[in-house]
Image (cartoon, rainbow, N blue to C red):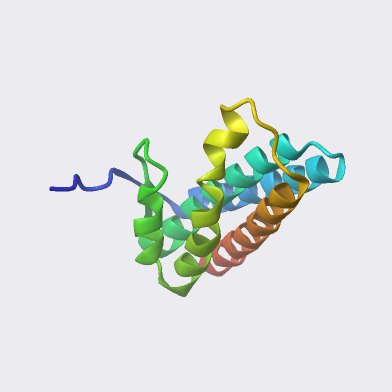
């Protein structure tokens, strides 16, 4: 039997904070991509997506995933309406890059980094819209 996902309650102020962090990570990822730092850009893009997911789940469900397995957030996003589904689509593609970007010695191809940054930008934009609607 699968263990239920651990969650934490998220306030409106925290939703705004997660959305701001998502935007900051996405902007830094864009800057690093432009400078040719593909590993850093990819890593920052992943963190943008994770924070965007926390913002959207917080806004729509008043909670976020709190387990060590980042994949648990995908299930929560599926419960967070169309905004959650949109973020999950991009985050599902970002999460598999985490180990390669952050722990393995291999380089990240420029095209992979560019796609990761595009996904992060979409996630951050969605988080910002959701946070603004939440007030």
Quarter holding residue 97: top right
- Residue 91 x/y as whole percent: 52, 55
Q: Is residue 109 left or right of residue 77?
A: right
Tell me: residue 119, above or below residue 3: below
Seen at 64% across and 54% down, the residue is 120
Q: Is residue 35 left or right of residue 118?
A: right
Quarter in which the C terminus is drawn: bottom right
Seen at 56% across and 27% down, the residue is 103
- Residue 118 x/y as whole percent: 70, 58
Tell me: residue 132, above or below residue 39: below
Which is more toward the observer, 59 or 106?
106
- Residue 52 x/y as whole percent: 55, 53
Seen at 47% across and 51% down, the residue is 54
- Residue 3 x/y as whole percent: 19, 44
Q: Is residue 43 left or right of residue 91?
A: right
Seen at 43% across and 56% down, the residue is 58
């Amino acid at each position: 039997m699968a263990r239920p996902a651990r969650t934490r309650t998220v306030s409106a102020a925290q939703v705004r904070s997660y959305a701001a962090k998502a935007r900051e990570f996405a902007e830094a990822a864009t800057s690093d991509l432009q400078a040719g730092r593909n590993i850093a850009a990819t890593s920052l893009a992943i963190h943008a997506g994770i924070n965007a997911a926390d913002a959207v789940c917080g806004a729509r469900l008043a909670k976020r995933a709190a387990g060590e397995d980042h994949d648990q957030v995908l299930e929560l996003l599926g419960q967070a309406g169309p905004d959650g589904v949109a973020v999950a689509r991009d985050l599902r593609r970002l999460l598999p890059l985490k180990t390669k970007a952050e722990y393995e010695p291999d380089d990240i191809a420029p095209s992979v980094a560019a796609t990761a940054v595009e996904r992060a930008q979409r996630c951050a934009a969605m988080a910002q819209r959701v946070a603004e609607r939440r007030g």
